[in-house]
Image (cartoon, helix red, strand yellow):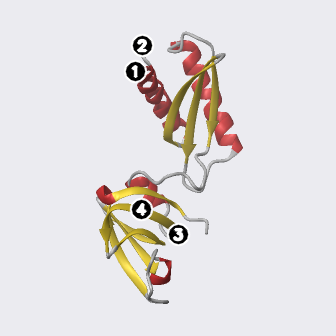
Amino acid sequence: MNIKELKDKITDYANIVGEQEGVEIVNVEIYPGGKGLTLRIFIDKEGGVTIKDCENFSRAIEAILDVEDPIKSSYTLEVSSPGIDRPLKNKKDFLRNIGRDVKITTKEKIADNTFFIGKIVDVGDDWVRIEIQETKIKGSKKKGKTELLFIPFNKIIKAQVYLG
């Protein structure tokens, strides 16, 4: 089994455990290392992840991995929260962060800019609407004016919570 197939299989197991434990699987990463593989699973939930959530998830996924044995070599399992500054990649990520400041880089100019810092106001099926202060638009000369801006997801290169 190659790494991609292994990642897909472990992601399936993680999603089952995540549903049981009330957490969302944000990402599964597998890295080869000197002493086998490192399996890193990032989880999240409404209100944030606690250490206890990570412990419970870790025990549950370990039990499945021990029984199913998809990893034939030794491995290290790491379970953690993706952190507040993780990239926002999909609609669910943006919905979870409504009301927070974000920084967004787009691949094409929108309102004469490709970099924005603003508060997420609303999220649609294929867009995010942010409220920006024009003073926070890179290169803007206007001061203090607030503007609502729709940004299509397919135009976003990078987005994350802005800790400013």
- At which x and y percent is residue 61? 57, 26
- Disc 2 residue type (three-letter): Met
- At which x and y percent is residue 68? 51, 14
Q: Quadrant of the N terminus?
A: top left
Find numbered disc 3 in the image and state the secondary structure of the residue it sits on: strand
Of the numbered discs in the image, which one, if any, rests on residue 105?
A: 4
Q: Residue at x 43, y 56 (%)?
A: 158
Whole-angstrom CA distance, mark 4 to mark 2, is 37 Å
Residue tagged by mark 3? 101
**Dot 4 or dot 1, earlier in sequence:** 1
- At which x and y percent is residue 37? 59, 20
Find numbered disc 2 in the image and state the secondary structure of the residue it sits on: loop
Q: Give the crowd class for mark 4: few <14, some 14-19, many >=20 residues within 10 Å.
A: some
Q: Residue at x 44, y 88 (%)?
A: 142
Task: Check contact, mark 2 vs mark 1: CB within 8 A.
Answer: yes
Whole-angstrom CA distance, mark 3 to mark 1, is 37 Å
